[in-house]
Image (cartoon, rainbow, N blue to C red):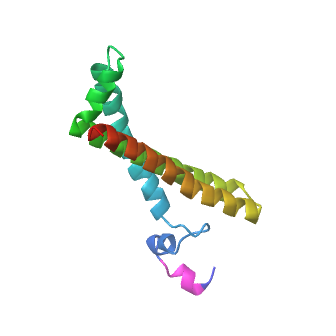
Amino acid sequence: MSKQRAMRSALGRVRNHGAAGEGTGHFIAQRVSSIALAILAPWFVVSAALALRDGAYASVIDFLTYPVNAVGVVLLLVAGLWHMMLGMQEVIVDYIHKPSSKIVLLLLNAFVPLALGAGAVFAVLLINFGA
């Protein structure tokens, strides 16, 4: 170990981005999205089960026209897709070794959740505003 490295604190070594070049930002982002999902998913299951007991299409529309429900569903969608993207990025970086495949998969991993999220948020907002 070099003298300069030996003089660094544990935090200094972590902030130097580690082996993957990602540092702790990716780790923290995954934990934050996990906490958001741990709060939003049970809320959605319980409130949707209570509101959609009859299973009618009109009940779903009524559920999403309430602003609190619409915001909660949008937050759940964004947190879920963000968490999925972070997890898949970790899998791709760790287990795909061919550089060209890794680049293609990382690009797909960036754009597919973005497209799915945009479509889902648009659908929720369309229903909420009654268009």
Q: Position of residue 49 (x, y in %)?
A: 33, 21
SS assignment for the magenta stretch, majority? helix
**Image quarter of the N terminus:** bottom right
Front-lying residue, 39 or 117: 117
- Residue lying at the far right in this picture: please name it: 98
Can you see residue 39?
no
Q: In the depicted view, which residue is nearer to us: 63 or 6?
A: 63
Q: In this picture, is 52 found above or below 18?
A: above
Judge whether residue 91 is colored magenta.
no
Q: Which residues are the magenta region?
A: 3-8
Rendered view: 47 above or below 101: above
Q: Residue furthest bottom?
A: 3
Dividing the picture into quadrants, the one containing residue 52 is: top left
Quadrant of the image occupied by residue 43: top left
Is 38 rendered above or below residue 18?
Answer: above
Instruction: Residue 79: tell me if it is visible.
Output: yes
Q: Magenta includes 5?
A: yes
| Residue shown at the point (35%, 17%) measured from the top left | 56
Residue 59 falls in image quadrant: top left
Looking at the rendered image, the quarter that the C terminus falls into is top left
> Going 44% across and 50% down the picture, which residue do you hit?
118
